[in-house]
């Protein structure tokens, strides 16, 4: 019996893993996570595999690494021994501080926007991933751990005749 556990909000990851471990060994399947990095240190049941809901072909470039490299280049150039270089270093530090502040605010806004999803809204990404898994192996049941994912799971269950459980 192939089971898919859907867990977009990673707050309930320990409960999800404990529930899947407590089930009999006859179940196997996939855990779809909003953030795959949360499960890296946790124990995934042996009959299950963990996947990210969003498909990423390449890892995203690290903004922090690019900022660090750019800062090092500017500081190396600015520390050439003149007083102008010291002033440029101060201005650079101020600009970087403001950029980090704006970046933090934008991250907070994205989190708030993703958590304030309208009730009844279907996630296209999640529906696509469920359909993709269904094409490879027949899904018998979908276990939803977050109410955010319930409308999508119900629509998928109606369309493909799959049992949807809320945990």
Image (spheres, rainbow, N blue to C red):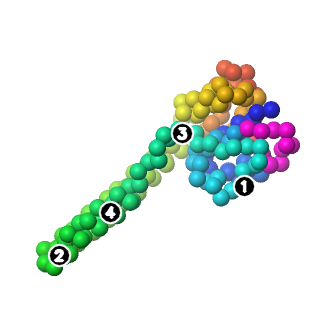
- Relative to 109, 121 lies left or right: right
> Residue 43, which numbered label?
1
The residue under label 4 is 69
Is residue 79 found inside the magenta-colored segment of the image? no
The residue under label 3 is 54
> Residue 113: x, y in percent?
47, 43
Asked if the residue under mark 1 is in contact with the one under mark 2, i.e. CB atoms within 8 Å, the reply is no
In space, the residues marked 2 and 3 are separated at their CA atoms by: 46 Å
For label 3, count other residues whose C-alpha is less than 10 Å away and answer few (under 14), some (14-19) or many (20+): some
In space, the residues marked 1 and 3 are separated at their CA atoms by: 21 Å
Residue closest to the eye, 75 or 103: 75
Dot 1 falls on a residue whose secondary structure is loop
Dot 4 falls on a residue whose secondary structure is helix
> Residue 80, which numbered label?
2
Residue 112 can be seen, yes or no: yes
Q: Residue at x 24, y 71 (%)?
A: 76
Above or below, comparing residue 25 to residue 67 in the picture: above
In space, the residues marked 2 and 4 are separated at their CA atoms by: 18 Å
The residues colored magenta run 19-29
For label 4, count other residues whose C-alpha is less than 10 Å away and answer few (under 14), some (14-19) or many (20+): few
């Amino acid at each position: 019996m192939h089971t898919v556990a859907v867990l977009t909000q990673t707050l309930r990851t320990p409960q999800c893993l404990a529930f899947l471990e407590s089930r009999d060994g006859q179940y196997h399947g996939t855990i779809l996570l909003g953030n795959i990095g949360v499960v890296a240190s946790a124990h995934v049941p042996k009959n299950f595999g963990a996947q990210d809901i969003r498909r990423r072909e390449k890892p995203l470039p690290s903004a922090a690494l690019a900022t660090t490299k750019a800062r090092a280049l500017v500081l190396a150039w600015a520390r050439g021994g003149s007083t102008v270089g010291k002033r440029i270093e101060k201005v650079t530090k101020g600009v970087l501080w403001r950029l980090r502040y704006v970046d933090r605010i934008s991250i907070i806004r994205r989190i708030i926007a993703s958590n304030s999803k309208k009730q009844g809204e279907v996630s296209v990404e999640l529906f696509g991933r469920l359909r993709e898994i269904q094409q490879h192996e027949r899904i018998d049941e979908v276990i939803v751990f977050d109410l955010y994912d319930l409308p999508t799971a119900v629509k998928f269950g109606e369309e493909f005749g799959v049992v949807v459980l809320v945990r």
